[in-house]
Image: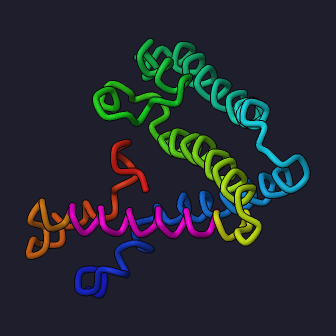
Amino acid sequence: RLFEAWWPVALPASGEVGVDVFLVLSGFLIGGSLQREVSGRGTVALGKFLLRRVFRIFPACVSAVLATMISEHVAGEEPSCPNVGFLANLFVFNNVRGISHLNRCLPQTWSIGLEFQLYMVTPLIFACASWVSSRSSRITIASCVEAMCALGFAACCVLRVWFVVSHDLVDSPVSNWWTLFNFYQPTQFRC
């Protein structure tokens, strides 16, 4: 009953909070690593950073897809990883609007695409912060990163309110406004 009556309970009760916690911890660790790199070198080696991320994630992802394909073949089941599903998982596009309905192969890997978005944006934030702080002695890299993250959070809040108002979800039943908490599944609304 509380779940239906009070919407803040819906978020932790959804079971997807684990992904959010993982992304927060991952962002914290990646941010710390990038902060040390910027402090030591003065810049972010984006190519090396992304290459390290690829070699950390892709071997396990490709192994899981291949193990699924082999076990289904041995069991004589219809493959859930057709060419489109395999390629979508391989290139971390398994949750992109337009092809996600074609992918039945390891649907739980949708969060890997989100994680890679985090890996793409975080070094760019630090590179921008490094550039801005090099232009002014009063602005530190940390304060610049904090300001950009606060602006990003504010933009996400505005986007969510706009979405609720523009889709007339304010007075809708609970089953309709549940979409408020699914922003990170469609690629276009990831915040």
**Residue closer to the observer: 89 or 156:** 156
Where does the image place residue 90, in percent across and percent down from the top left? 56, 23
Front residue of 49 and 138: 138
Residue 11 appears left or right of 71 = left
Q: x, y percentage for residue 4? A: 24, 80
Residue 23 located left or right of residue 140: left
Q: Is residue 42 above or below residue 5?
A: above
Q: Choose top left, top right, bottom left or bottom right for residue 54.
A: top right
Vertical comparison of 186 with 154: above or below: above
User: Where is residue 26 drawn, in percent x and y?
Assistant: 68, 56
Please count the marks in the image: 0
Up/down of 130 relative to 84, above or below: below
Name the residue rendered at 34%, 55% in the picture: 183
Q: Residue at x 57, y 25 (%)?
A: 68
Q: Quadrant of residue 50?
A: top right
Q: Residue furthest front?
A: 136
In the image, 73 versus 107, the foreground residue is 107
Give the colour scheme of this rendering.
Answer: rainbow
Determine the image quadrant of residue 102.
Answer: top left
User: For the point 79% across and 45% down, which residue is it?
Assistant: 43
Please report the bounds of the magenta region as a residue range.
145-163
Q: Is residue 181 magenta?
A: no
Residue at 43% across, 56% down: 191
Give the left or right position of residue 166, taking residue 49 as reference: left
